Every structure is written in structure tokens, then in C-alpha cells.
Image: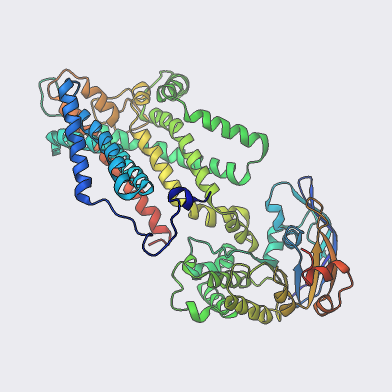
Amino acid sequence: MAKRIEASNVSSYYGSFKAIDSVSMTVEPKTITALIGPSGCGKSTFLRSVNRMHEVLPGARIEGSLTIDDQNIYDPDVDVTAVRRMIGMVFQRPNPFPTMSIYENVVAGLKLNGVKKKSVLDDAAEQSLKSANLWNEVKDRLNRPGAGLSGGQQQRLCIARTIAVEPQVVLMDEPCSALDPISTLAIEDLMFKLKDRFTIIIVTHNMQQAARVSDKTGFFSIDKTGDPGRLIEYDDTQKIFSNPTEKKTEDYITGRFG
Amino acid sequence: MSLLDREAAGVVMTPDNIRTKRLPLGINLGIAAAGLLIAAAVVYGFGIGNYVLVVVLGVVFYLIGLQVVAGRIEGPRTARDRMWKTLIYAACVLAILPLASVVWTLVSKGVERLDGNFFGTSMNNIGARDPEGGAYHAIIGTLEQVGIATLIAVPLGVLGAIYLVEYGRGRFANTVRFFVDVMTGIPSIVAGLFILSFWVLIVSPWFNNGTPRFSGFAASLALTVLMLPTIVRSTEEMLRLVPGPLREGAYALGVPQWKTILKVVLPTALPGIVTGVMLAVARAAGETAPVLLVAGGAASINFNPFEGGQQSLALFVYQQAGDASRYAPARAWTAALTLVAIVLILTIAAKLLARRNSLSK
């Protein structure tokens, strides 16, 4: 199920502004890859170009190629909806649908994609909520509004919603930045569990988190504001945090820069 | 200089001096009474007005007195706070007064003809000396005309707003937005004249053996022209308030854009959209000029909006208010009350309906 992602010379533009310059990396199936780097260095932009979410902004475009199991997702005849169905995304801020209950939120992806059978939906809801470590907390109030949960619960609800559609890749854009340490730990545990089934890419500002959860780490940086972000180093997490090749990476992870 | 220095120079914060003395209620009321007394003395002394001016001047004097006295007792900052608070409450009361006055006038003058006869009969064969006669035909007319106008304007307006927010980019969208703004300013009589010259005089003869024909439907079209910009603009604002991450959340699940709009964006914005639509409906229901121009009004019941003249409540009020019969003014008041009641009931019903769909119970 999980897929290999291969980016080669990906440059991303917002209008005439070049946000990232020529990023190449290969993400192996069933691994967790962390993207770290200072603010504005293009790691979120890169993440959003993996499921073509950056196209939501007018004027955004991309150069280079991004293949998922050798399929270039930027080919003109590729259906962007199908790509996003395959590549789920969890956002920085929890964004449950406010008009839907907890149950409806979890099965929203299935329901809106045409699954009608109640038993299938019920199963998917229970499985996803269990996978997201939320089932025990909400099983008695599935019909209450999803927006009424706490921040950490909402984020786990969003993760449940994402994995309910059985994507092959899960992208996480700073999923823990608004959460307390306990909720963060819950989500990190969850990522380990999900690793068996999905390929995960996570953007994080928390270097301990990157070191804890990821197999591989990519370090992005910019020279100065207005310059495009570049991938400075991409290697095993172990190596990045103990013996990085690039001076810049070492400066960043030891706190001397950025 | 810090805020603390400016407000109370040389004061060190201690548990004691964080408390301030409050103005006792008795003194507050005393100032109010004194303000009113002075105002009465000024107004009646110079003979320049009646009790309304006394109240207005009294409030002004009260605010000044409050500021001075409270400043002495409570200190300048608390006194300023108190004065502005009082001013804001006064403004609220002032804004509600005309509304309360309108409702009171409508109810007190409208109850006279609030009977079965009024709601059960038309003005057919009612002469100047007949005390009976009712607005049944006008109620039918208003409901049909506004109903049809709503049926046309809501889908067009909401779809237009969806285009502007979700799809529209570049020059065409800006042009549409500009013309919607221009349409907002169209006087109702101009909308009526437009439908008169276009629909009644040019199009309607095709369906009527070459003779132009008034109809309730023509009035609906004129009302549609008036409702459309209100609905487009209010819906547009509401759709813009729906956070972008919500849309992205749906896209990330592989939900197509049209379904995201239909199932996520519209339900989130629904209460606001309903409010906008009801404002448009209320405005349309109160229009007189276009109905007079293109539906012509009628004394008898006409259920068919596509053939012949039709009455509406607003037009009925206008005609009865100007009628020479001594029984007409009472009919006008009751019709006005009915019109307000219908709009109110529709608004409440729409709000309840919009709320039932969302989870905010």
C-alpha cells in the first residue's frame, strides 16, 4: 500500500516568487521522514506540493517532477482529486468541519466520495478512531460536534479523518505545534503505529520530535529573506543529528543559527 | 511615561490602592434627576420645545454631571469609563426607541380591523361607504410575488456568490463584482420601469396575442432585480468568512471542489446566508413602486401570477392610505401590521430552519 515518493529538481513558485529551488529527495515506503529548517525555508511549500495542495493558491505552480511509484503526479492528465485521495494531509491547526458531528467528521472523506453503506462507514469510523487513539474518549458522544473537543482531541480527530480514506501517504504539517506535550506524545505514538501502513512525511519545528520519530531527516534552509529555500542535507536521522555532512545543518541543530 | 505614571503619578501599587471608591447609586440617580430638572427648567423657561427635548437635554446634562461628579469621587479614568458606558447605553436606547414606536403604532392602530373579514375578503365591490373589505387578495399577491422572486433570486444569487468566491479570478470576476455593487444602488422605481419597458411592453405581448399585460410575475421579476445584489453580496461575505483550512481539509481527503463547496463550505456559511436572504425578502416584500408599475394592483382576488393585475400588501397600504373613504385608513394600518408580521414570521422560520441543520444546539 505505502508508496515511494521521488522528487527530482522540484522548484515551486507563487506567481513570480520562487519559494523552493530544485529539491530532490527519495522517500521510501513505510518510513517517517521529517523536514526541519527555519521559518519560511519552504519545507511546508514542499510538503504541500507532494499532494498538489499548494495549487489552492492562485498563481502557484511547480517545475521538475514528483513521482509516486513512478507515476508523475504533475502530468497534465492526472486528476488532482485522485492524487489527494491517495495522499492525505494533516494540518498545523486542527480543522474539523464545524457543521459535522465527530462521527460525520471521521467518515466525511468516505461519505463525500460516495460511500453510502452504513455498516462500512461505522466500521471505518471505529477503526480510524481506534487507530488515532481517540475511540475511548469519544465513543459515547459520536454525535456531538467535532469542534467541541479539546485541541489535542481535534487534531487526533483530523488524523482519524485522514486515515479513514486509507491513503498511501500521510503528510503532516507541524501537527503538534498547537498541542501540549501529552497530546504531542499521543500523536507521536500514533505515527509509529501508522508507519506499518503508511508513508509519513512530517514538517516540524521541534528537533527533538524529528529525532524521536523519523527515520530520515531533510534540512531546508534559505540564505536570506526573498531567496528560494533549498534542501541542504537529506540523510538518515541518526546521521543528521550526530554527524551531519554540512556545516549549516550542524549550526542549525546545535542552535547556532536559525 | 507608562500608563500608570500618567494616571496616578507617584503611586506605588499596593493591595490597598488597587481599589477605587465607587459612585453610590443614590448620587447617580440624583444626578439624573437634577439633569432632568435643569433641562425642564431650560426648555419650559425659554418655551423652546416639549417633553422630548427635555429628555434629550436631560440626558446631555446627566452625562456632563456624571462626568464631573464621578470624576471627583472615582478618579478620572473610572469616570471616563462610566460616562462612555452610559453614552453607549443611551445610544442603544435611542436606536431601539423608533423601532418600539413603530411597532406600538402599528399594533395600536392595526388591531381595529384585525378580524376574519379582513383576512377573508378582498376589496371587490367595496365602495367608499362600506366598512368591510379586506386584504386577502393583497396577502395572496405578496406571498406569490415574493415567493417567486425568492425562488429565482436565491439560486442565482448564491451561485453567483459561489462563482465570485470560489472560482472567479481576474477581470471578469471584478467586473461582475462591480456591477453587483452598482445594482445594489438601483432605486426600486427604476427596477420597476425596467421590467415595465422590457417584460410588460416587449415580452408579455408574445404570450398574449400582441397585447401588453400586467402580471404578478412581472412584479416578481422586478423584485428579483432588487433582491439579487443583496443576496450576492451577503452570501459572498459569508463564504469569504469560511476559513481556507476547512476547504483544504476537504481537498486533502480527495473531495472534489464542487462537493467541498456543497457539503462543507455552504453548510458552514448557511446561517449567515439565510440572514442575507431574509434581509432581501424583507426589502422585496415592502416594495410598492415596482408592483404598482408592472402588476398594477387589483381590487379582487387573483391567484394566477401570470395573468392580469395583482395586488400586494405594500401597494394595498399605499392605496388605502390615500383613499378618501373614512374606513380606508384602518385597513391600511392593519395591512401594514400584517406585512410586518409576515416578514417577521418568515425570518423566524428561516432562522429556525437554518439552525436545525447545524450542530449548534
Residue A201 appears in the picture as rendered = yes
Q: Classify residue A188 as left or right of residue B71.
A: right
The vertical placement of B249 against B351, above or below, is below
> Which sits in the foreground, B169 or B73?
B73
Q: Position of residue B5 (x, y in %)?
A: 48, 51
Q: Position of residue A60 (x, y in %)?
A: 74, 50
The structure residue drawn at horizontal position 45% and vertical position 53%, both measured from the top left corner, is B10
Quarter holding residue B283: top left
The structure residue drawn at horizontal position 53% and vertical position 57%, both measured from the top left corner, is B263
The vertical placement of A94 against A17, above or below, is below
Quarter holding residue B341: top left
Outermost residue to the right: A245
Q: Position of residue B195 (x, y in %)?
A: 44, 24
Q: Classify residue B164 as left or right of residue B58.
A: right
Q: Position of residue B17 (x, y in %)?
A: 37, 59
- For the C terminus of chain B, give its image quadrant: bottom left
Q: Classify residue A106 as left or right of residue B91.
A: right
Outermost residue to the front: B10
> Which sits in the foreground, B247 or B304?
B247
> Which sits in the foreground, B208 or B287?
B287
